[in-house]
Image (cartoon, rainbow, N blue to C red):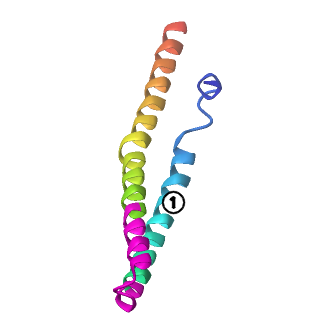
Amino acid sequence: MESVHAGLRWSVQNPIDCMVHDHEVVARALVRTRELSTRLQEQAPGCLSMQALFVALRELEADTRHHIHKENNVLFPAGLRAEAAIANRRARLEERAS
């Protein structure tokens, strides 16, 4: 709340931008992991341990992509809307005070 009282010098946009960048890096890593695991799977089709690993990797990818989707498409926009609402409320209060 201090940022609101200080004239919004700080914004949630900055950390959101960093996290979106991190999400892009993780998404590329997931693609690369899937590519490598597919090659491995082709080399060891009958190994139960490897099959279990591939199932776990697919679950990890699905969970991570779901997490990224929720943050990018729900949480981050909600944070930006909340910040905008606070800034608008502050501006209205300042107008009334002048």
* Residue visible at 55% across and 54% down in the picture: 18
Q: Residue furthest top?
A: 97
- Residue 74 horizontal side relative to residue 10, left or right: left
Q: Position of residue 32 (x, y in %)?
A: 44, 77
* Residue visible at 37% across and 52% down in the picture: 69
Which residue lies under the disc numbered 1?
21
* Residue visible at 44% across and 83% down in the picture: 36
Front position in the image: 39 or 55: 55
Q: Was residue 81 drawn as part of the magenta stretch in this picture?
A: no
Please report the bounds of the magenta region as a residue range: 39-59
Q: Quadrant of the C terminus?
A: top right
Q: Name the image quarter holding residue 10.
A: top right
Front position in the image: 48 or 59: 48
Q: Position of residue 42 (x, y in %)?
A: 35, 89
Q: Name the image quarter holding residue 8.
A: top right
Q: Was residue 52 drawn as part of the magenta stretch in this picture?
A: yes
How packed mark 1 is, by other alpha carbons closer than 10 Å (few <14, some 14-19, many 20 or more), is few
Q: Residue furthest bottom?
A: 43
Amino acid type, callout 1? His
